[in-house]
Image (cartoon, rainbow, N blue to C red):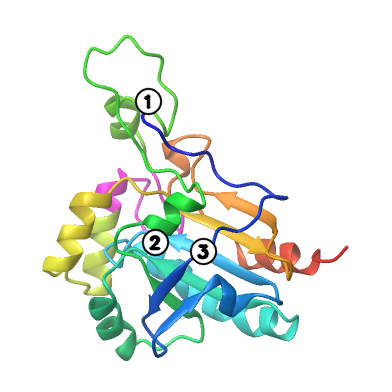
Amino acid sequence: MGDQKRPLQPGDSAPAFALATANLDGTVSLADLSGRPFLIGFFRGLHCPFCRRQVEQLASVQPTLRAAGVETVAVINTPVERARLYFRHRPTPVTLLCDPDCRTHRAYGVPYGEFLPDGSSEPSEWPYGATMAQFQAARINPTGELPEPLHPMEANAILNAKDRFELDESDNAIFEKHATQLVGHFLVDANGTISWAQIEALDGPNSLCIFPTAAEIIAAASSLGR
């Protein structure tokens, strides 16, 4: 279903990009990062509490990666003005890039969920052609903050309330347009070649919002050049 490109894999060349930054001046492009390795994560917008938490985790890993010569970049599906306001109060050492249209997510093949029409005879294939029943049955508690595994939408609402994060008009617009966007992490070597990739929930919706741990990221970075 659809025309989604599959996620890029180790050995593939990293596609070019140039995106506005939320915590630096101007834009950052692939060319700006060339000649040194970098970790790049593609996230949903600020409306996703699990993505906000993963950006915080990247901030905690950033000093270790920087010491190893690896830059840390996060692409968030949020307009730059909204992102700048949010991160002005929550500064981070991670280079934050804004892509409200998910164009770079698409370029790197990070999937977005598509649902088969009711009554369709097509075989389901998560996430490229799933049934709504598959998604409705999902229960998650990836960070252990919830009283029990809950449906992803209910989990989002509870954690946003816990964080006192109120979605504004731009957040709601992004959520409406890109609610099914998945998350992907890629490690790109100094030659611009992907050396490691991890995509959220490829094995099913019960794995939604499970992202690479700090240890996994550091281990992937330590394998560069081997």
Determine which quarter of the picture holds residue 111.
top left
Q: Nearer the viewer, residue 31 or 73?
A: 31
Query: Measuring 22% from the left and 59% from the top, which residue is drawn there?
Result: 174
Q: Nearer the viewer, residue 141 or 4?
A: 4
Q: Residue at x 61, y 58 (%)?
A: 14
- Give me the C-alpha separation between circle 1 and circle 2: 27 Å
Magenta span: 140-155
Indicate the secondary structure of the residue bearing disc 2: helix
Q: CA distance from mark 1 to mark 3?
A: 25 Å
Q: What secondary structure is the stretch in magenta mostly built from?
A: loop
Quadrant placement of the C terminus: bottom right
The image shows residue 202 at horizontal and vertical percentages of 52, 38
User: Can see residue 209?
Assistant: no
Left or right of residue 192, residue 98 in this image: left
Pointers 1 and 2 in contact (C-beta within 8 Å):
no
Who is closer to the viewer here, 53 or 20? Answer: 20
Residue receiving disc 1: 1
User: Which class describes the residues within 10 Å of circle 1: few (<14), some (14-19), or many (20+)?
Assistant: some
Identify the amino acid type marked 2.
Phe
